[in-house]
Amino acid sequence: EEGTKDGRGLSMFIYDRNDGGVTVRRIENKMGIKGSPTCELVFKNAKAELCGSRKLGLIKYVMALMNGARLGIAAQSVGVSEAAYREAIAYARDRKQFGQAIIEFPAVFEMISLMKAKLDASRSLLYETTRFVDMYKAYEDIAKERSLEPEERAEMKAYQKLADAFTPMAKGMSSEFCNQNAYDCVQVHGGSGFMKDYACERIYRDARITSIYEGTTQLQVVAAIRHVTTGTYLHQIEAYEAAEIAPELEPLRDRLKAMKAAYVKAVETVTATKDNEYIDFQARRMVEMAGHVIMGHLLLNDATRNESFRQSAEVYINFGEAEVAKHAAFIERFNPEMMAAYRK
């Protein structure tokens, strides 16, 4: 729009392909997801109609579409992670080396148990995120038919904030875990995993897009970091700490509380600089720290409801504890002046 310089001046338009003016330049030859054709469209004198209101194209409509798509890709990531885990464990049980199945070797069973923990944690985060989105959307639908009561409106806003906070975290964390699980699946297969004879080769290629499209992991961090600095994640972590869990899981929750303390200290250290560039530099570490604590709590909740999640909860908290300590140590020993070494 005239007089605007950024996304707040963009509108959305709808095009009817029957009106002509658009051609397909080519079908892309992609690394993976070959079952989903991708093409480049060329628009030339193509008629279009305004969608909705002017100036809301990007900041309202496209962002709403992207949030929905990001949730879908989080689900896709969980699906690919599941496929990778199933292929890995089936091969490890079947492949014999030195007179025994390779799943009996510590290097292999550790890898597979961590794949399972990452998969279960990703699924738990996905379900929690969709719960927040469902609740927010349900209130939104009710509001179209009648005025919401004050407490209902407050609850809708609370769920909206949680949906906004958890969507980029779910997309970012689950897509990264998806790529890691696909990598480990090939590793379990060894040289055979590099061959097209095995499904893991396709899984490896299909996984790669999940941390790229509908916003790279780096962009998910950009969306998530404000929920670190404003305390949205911390408030929800404290809600999980207050939840009832099986008594035998309390030692694991105590470790999560220690992880939270490290996260809080790291956030305070970074934000105290009041240097936005430095906050952005450390953003991914802080978002991941929050993610590990949240996913650990979600697995404890799952293990309380179903004993079969106990192993994944323990394995994941072992993993998350080490990751949080690593990020905390990096932040503690770093300062804004040290960013100069990273500049080109």
Image (spheres, rainbow, N blue to C red):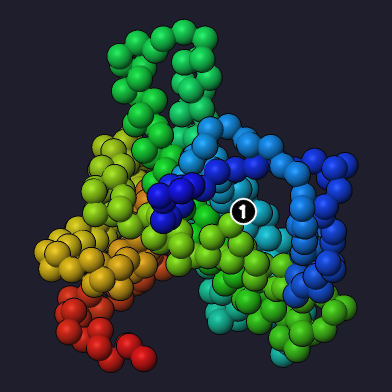
Give residue 137's position: percent from left, percent from top.
51, 27
Numbered label tally: 1
Give residue 234's position: percent from left, percent from top.
26, 48
Q: Is residue 154 left or right of residue 333?
A: right
User: Among all residues in the image, which is located at the extreme top?
Assistant: 146
Give residue 38's position: percent from left, percent from top.
78, 62
Q: Residue at x 56, y 82 (%)?
A: 107
Q: Residues within 10 Å of mark 1 (few under 14, many from 20)?
A: many
Q: Is residue 196 visible?
A: yes
Which one is in front, 256 or 64?
64
Give residue 53's position: percent from left, percent from top.
53, 33
Where on the picture, by quarter, is residue 322? Answer: bottom left
Considering only vertical position in the picture, is 334 above or below 295? Answer: below
Where on the picture, by quarter, is residue 49? Answer: top right
The residue indicated by pointer 1 is: 73
Q: Is residue 217 left or right of residue 341?
A: right
Which one is in front, 201 or 322?
201
User: Among all residues in the image, which is located at the extreme front?
Assistant: 2
Q: Residue at x 31, y 36 (%)?
A: 243
Which amino acid does the dot numbered 1 rest on? Ile
Q: Is the C terminus in the top left, top right, bottom left or bottom right quadrant?
A: bottom left
Which one is in front, 241 or 40?
40
Secondary structure beneath disc 1?
A: helix
User: Among all residues in the image, which is located at the extreme left?
Assistant: 272
Q: Is residue 128 left or right of residue 284?
A: right
Considering only vertical position in the picture, is 75 above or below 319? Answer: above
Q: Residue at x 60, y 48 (%)?
A: 69
Q: Is residue 300 visible?
A: no
Q: Residue at x 62, y 53 (%)?
A: 73
